[in-house]
Image (cartoon, rainbow, N blue to C red):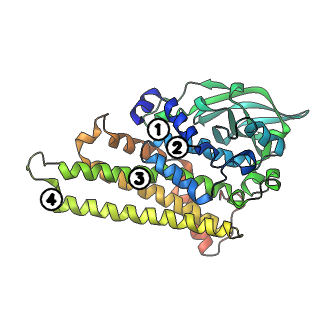
């Protein structure tokens, strides 16, 4: 359904229903609300497997699954708001604090415009960040019905994510539906007094970035299979030679297979490392959290490079709209430019840590 999703600019309802029936939206919900509370190591693999079929679906549905993790950090009443009725929620989220939250009696009044509301067409609630008058930044959630959705998502890639802008104008949010971003990031939310399992001790950004890079890796794996099939049956336009007998083609295909295996191995190994550490009762140090950010940025960069080279090898036939190859290439080049995969800054941060430099207070780890 990837092409249908792209043309519609949203994930098909049939796909959403399939994922609901499979129970994936309960994966990151506490068991006390009927959720699965799965081991961390399975969460990035959900993103990756979905990415093998449709990057927009993997990105959108993956984050709707993942955002349940954030709700586990909110106060108990907030958790009841989102999970009491059906045991999971589908909540798009926006990270940048593009609005303001004014303290009022019983809560806050929110005003602002937020971009990239991925999956807003399918959402019950929406998570967002806003500046409070005291200069701090907090995370809030509101019913999707409180927002005005602006038709802004006119793009050349990742079209099915439907990442439109949304606005609020002096909308009230009760205090229990808020949490300081620093508390959420550092695992100090009030909800963790209730949710005590190891999953909830995984650092927020560590879980987010490993999930986020899954679609890129899954797409690269799918691309390798597609291009291998094309080259196996392809004949040179001018030479008439079978590509399966052309040495440079075989060498480049094999090289990309090994590169992809290495990237997948790194991805899997770091996920196992995190899971073993957290589920063994430990925590990640700041240095290790910075390393994980760099690993994810590297996986994103390598996945994009592999996809680009494989697309070139596939030839002009792969540019037709009925070929998933061109869609994978467009989507992955778009995703690889996301701020959370920015390689140079992340490498600079970790390289400094390796040489004993002071750790920045505002490091996004």
The answer to whether one can see residue 213 in this image is no
Secondary structure type for disc 3: helix
Q: Residues within 10 Å of mark 1 (few under 14, many from 20)?
A: many
Mark closer to the chain start, 4 or 2: 2
Q: Which mark is residue 59?
A: 2
Which residue does the image show at 45% across and 54% down from the upper left? 217
Asked if the residue under mark 1 is in contact with the one under mark 2, i.e. CB atoms within 8 Å, the reply is yes
Q: Residues within 10 Å of mark 4 (few under 14, many from 20)?
A: few
Quadrant location, the N terminus: top left
Q: Position of residue 98 (x, y in %)?
A: 68, 37
Q: Which mark is residue 158?
A: 1
Q: Which mark is residue 246?
A: 4
Secondary structure type for disc 2: helix
Inter-mark Cα distance, 3 to 2: 15 Å
Mark closer to the chain start, 1 or 3: 1
Q: Which mark is residue 179?
A: none
Q: Which is more toward the observer, 117 or 115?
A: 117
Mark closer to the chain start, 3 or 2: 2
Residue under circle 3?
Answer: 304
Q: Is residue 183 above or below residue 327?
A: below
Q: Position of residue 12 (x, y in %)?
A: 49, 30
Mark closer to the chain start, 1 or 4: 1
Which residue does the image show at 23% across and 63% down from the upper left? 251
């Amino acid at each position: 359904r990837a092409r249908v999703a792209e043309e519609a600019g949203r994930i098909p309802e049939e796909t959403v229903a399939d994922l609901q029936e499979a129970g994936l939206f309960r994966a990151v919900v506490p068991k006390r609300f009927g959720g699965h509370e799965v081991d961390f190591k399975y969460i990035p693999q959900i993103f990756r497997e979905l990415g093998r079929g449709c990057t927009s679906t993997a990105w959108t549905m993956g984050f709707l699954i993942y955002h349940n993790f954030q709700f586990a950090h909110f106060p108990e009443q907030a958790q009841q708001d989102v999970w009491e009725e059906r045991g999971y929620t589908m909540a798009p989220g926006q990270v940048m604090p593009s609005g303001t939250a004014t303290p009022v009696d019983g809560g806050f009044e929110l005003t602002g415009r937020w971009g990239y509301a991925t999956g807003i067409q399918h959402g019950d609630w929406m998570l967002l960040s806003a500046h409070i008058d005291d200069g701090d930044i907090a995370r809030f959630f509101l019913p999707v019905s409180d927002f005005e959705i602006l038709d802004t998502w006119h793009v050349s890639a990742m079209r099915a994510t439907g990442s439109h802008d949304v606005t609020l104008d002096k909308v009230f949010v009760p205090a229990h539906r808020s949490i300081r971003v620093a508390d959420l990031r550092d695992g100090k939310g009030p909800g963790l007094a209730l949710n005590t399992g190891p999953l909830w001790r995984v650092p927020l950004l560590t879980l987010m970035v490993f999930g986020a890079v899954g679609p890129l890796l899954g797409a690269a794996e799918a691309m390798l299979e597609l291009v291998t099939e094309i080259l196996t049956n392809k004949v040179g336009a001018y030479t008439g030679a079978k590509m399966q007998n052309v040495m440079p083609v075989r060498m480049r295909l094999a090289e990309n297979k090994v590169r992809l295996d290495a990237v997948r191995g790194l991805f899997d190994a770091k996920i196992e490392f995190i899971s073993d550490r957290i589920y063994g009762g430990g925590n990640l140090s700041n240095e290790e959290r910075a390393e994980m950010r760099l690993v994810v940025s590297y996986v994103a960069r390598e996945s994009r490079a592999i996809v680009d080279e494989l697309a070139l090898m596939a030839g002009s036939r792969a540019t037709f709209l009925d070929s998933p190859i061109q869609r994978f290439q467009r989507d992955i080049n778009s995703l690889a430019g996301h701020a959370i995969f920015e390689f140079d800054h992340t490498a600079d941060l970790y390289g400094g840590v390796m040489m004993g430099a002071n750790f920045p207070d505002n490091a996004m780890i």
